[in-house]
Image (spheres, rainbow, N blue to C red):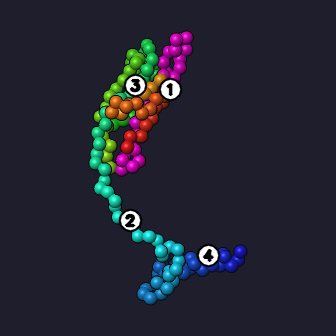
Amino acid sequence: MVKSHYIAGFGLVLALAGCGSSGAAAPEATSGSPTSSAPAAAPASSAPAENQTHTVTFEVLGKGKAMQPIMYVADEDGTASGVDLPWSKTFKVEVVGAEHQVGHLLSIVAGSSQAANGRLEAAACRISVDGKQVASGKGTCEYKLT
C-alpha cells in the first residue's frame, strides 16, 4: 500500500517537475506516463450542421375552458389564459449551432380541464414537429428538437 502511494505521489512530483523545467528534463520526466501518450485531437469529420426550421404545434385537448393558464416554451415563451379547449398554437422554430447536439427544448404545461364528472384533471397535451406527433401526455409535454 505504501509503495503504490509512494509511486502515485512520485508520479505527481515528476509531472509537476516536468511542467516547470526548461529543456531536456521535461521529456524524460513525462516519457512513458499515461498522460503523455494522449491521442491527438481528431480532425473534424464534417462541417457544422446547417440551421433547420421546423413547424411545431402545441395542443391541449379537452372540452370547455382551460381552468389554468397554458404555459409554453418554443421559439417564444408565453401563456394562454381562459382559452376554449381544444387549443393549439403553431410556431416556426429554427435549430441553430450547438442545438443540433444538445437539442432545443419544446415544452407545454397544459394545466387542468374539467372532466365529465365535473372534477378537475390534468389536461392532455401533444407536441407535433413537421406534422409528426413527437410527445403526448397529461399535464406536461416536452421534447428536445435536434
| Crowding near the residue tagged with mark 1, few <14, some 14–19, many ≥20 C-alpha atoms within 10 Å | some
Residue under label 4: 8
| Crowding near the residue tagged with mark 2, few <14, some 14–19, many ≥20 C-alpha atoms within 10 Å | few
Q: Nearer the viewer, mark 2 or mark 3?
A: 2
Residue 88, image x, y percentages: 36, 23
Spatial CA span between label 2 and label 1? 44 Å
Residue at 47 percent of width and 81 percent of height: 20
Q: Earlier in the sequence, mark 2 or mark 1?
A: 2
- Residue 14, labelled with which disc? none
Residue under label 1: 138
Residue 102, relative to residue 110: is it above or below? below
Amino acid type of the residue that numbered disc 3 sits on in the rendered structure: Glu
Residue under label 2: 42
Q: How many marks?
A: 4
In this rendering, position of residue 120 left or right of residue 135: right
| Crowding near the residue tagged with mark 3, few <14, some 14–19, many ≥20 C-alpha atoms within 10 Å | many
- What secondary structure is found at the residue carrying circle 1? strand
Spatial CA span between label 4 and label 1? 55 Å
Residue 104, relative to residue 5: is it above or below? above
Residue under label 3: 59
The residue range painted magenta reads 98-123
Amino acid type of the residue that numbered disc 4 sits on in the rendered structure: Ala
Residue 108, image x, y percentages: 43, 31
| Any part of residue 96 in sight | yes
Quadrant into which the C terminus falls: top left
Amino acid type of the residue that numbered disc 2 sits on in the rendered structure: Ala
